[in-house]
Amino acid sequence: MPATPDPIFQVEHLGLTYPARRGQPPATILEDISVEVAHGGALVLVGPSGSGKSSLLRCLNRLEEPTSGVVRFGGHPITELDPRELRRRAGSEEQRRDAKQRLLGSSLGNHAS
């Protein structure tokens, strides 16, 4: 992965596995995710339901603690930062499915012949 100049977020080999429950094996949700986001940049996650998009965002703002790897914000491991301060400074926003559908429907309707 080429280095991003002055990244605000750095994710290195992130993994998230939920422990086994009621006779079920452990569930690997994220495996070996690495990405960098530059200051002023954006991270767009696209994929089917259940592919780990929300889980990754929860790891970035410490609503979930990864089971492997490192997440840095401003060069510091997020485990060293106050979670509330991290969330305030990072400012992530998850899109709701209905909002995306309205936007797509509106865009398609405006460009249809």
Image (cartoon, rainbow, N blue to C red):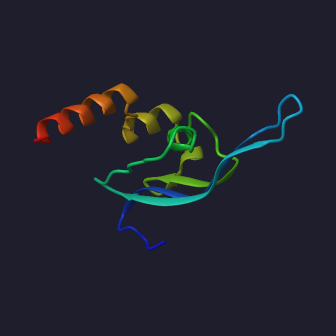
Name the residue at 31% across, 54% down: 41
* Whole-percent x, y for residue 83 in the image: 52, 35
* Whole-percent x, y for residue 47 in the image: 47, 46
Looking at the image, residue 105 lies above or below residue 68: above
Name the residue at 39% across, 29% down: 97
**Horizontal arrangement in the rendering, residue 24 relative to residue 3 (left or right):** right
Work out whether residue 96 can be spotted. no
Q: Nearer the viewer, residue 33 or 82?
A: 33
Quadrant of residue 91 within the rendered picture: top left
Q: Residue furthest front?
A: 113
Work out whether residue 2 can be spotted. yes
Quadrant of residue 20 within the rendered picture: top right
Q: Nearer the viewer, residue 11 or 73?
A: 11
Badge count: 0
State which quarter of the image contains the C terminus.
Answer: top left
Q: Nearer the viewer, residue 108 or 18?
A: 108
Quadrant of residue 7 within the rendered picture: bottom left
Q: Residue furthest bottom?
A: 2
Name the residue at 84% across, 35% down: 24
* Whole-percent x, y for residue 4 in the image: 39, 67
Q: Residue furthest top?
A: 98
**Horizontal arrangement in the rendering, residue 53 relative to residue 22 (left or right):** left
* Whole-percent x, y for residue 58 in the image: 53, 37
